[in-house]
Image (cartoon, helix red, strand yellow):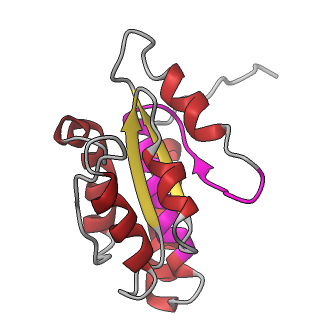
Amino acid sequence: MGSRNDFVVMRATVDVLREFGVAHEVRVVSAHRTPDLMFAYAEAAAGRGLRVIVAGAGGAAHLPGMIAAKTVVPVLGVPIAATALQGIDALLSIVQMPRGVPVATLAIGAAGATNAGLLAVAMLATTDPALQAKLVAWRAARREEVLSQGIQDEVPA
């Protein structure tokens, strides 16, 4: 994430990864304040065995795109509401990547962070049958939660 303050949102990604037992690391790597660290992190990612990177940032939100420019590891970008624009600036910054530097962009805030975690799990599950089984069970549990609410509109005959 771009700053320690972003963890309030990015905790949702961490929670998902923990729930699925996915090994992960949490780092503050600022595109603007620590660019050399960001470049080194991105350049070493594939060699360290990282298979997906979730990068959350607010404001100008250059972090996901700059990481994507320096690695072949897929990058998932989470826009964070950190300015008066409530994350719209970050969303536009992350989603408007030039051709050839893809960043999968999620929703602004905690919903996007949660979905980034789930998308990372789904990506990893394509080559991990045990993880795939956990994801299938997780989705089935969400379906059952909705069905157990029992709200149905009955139409009289």
Q: Is residue 118 above or below residue 64?
A: below
The foreground one among 98 and 88 is 98
Whether residue 97 sits left or right of residue 142 in the image: it is right
Where is residue 57? Give x, y as percent: 38, 39
Quarter of the image for residue 156 reads top right
Where is residue 14? Give x, y as percent: 27, 57
The foreground one among 115 and 150 is 115
Q: Quadrant of the C terminus?
A: top right
The residue drawn where x is 34% and y is 59% is 38
Start-end of magenta stretch: 99-123
Residue 141 in view, yes or no: no
Quarter of the image for residue 19 reads bottom left
Whether residue 103 sits left or right of residue 112 in the image: it is right
Does the stretch in magenta take in 105?
A: yes
Residue 87 in view, yes or no: yes
The residue drawn where x is 52% and y is 55% is 76
- Residue reaching furthest top? 84
Where is residue 123? Give x, y as percent: 56, 73
- Residue reaching furthest left? 4
Q: How many marks?
A: 0
- Residue reaching furthest front? 36
The residue drawn where x is 60% and y is 82% is 126
The residue drawn where x is 26% and y is 42% is 33
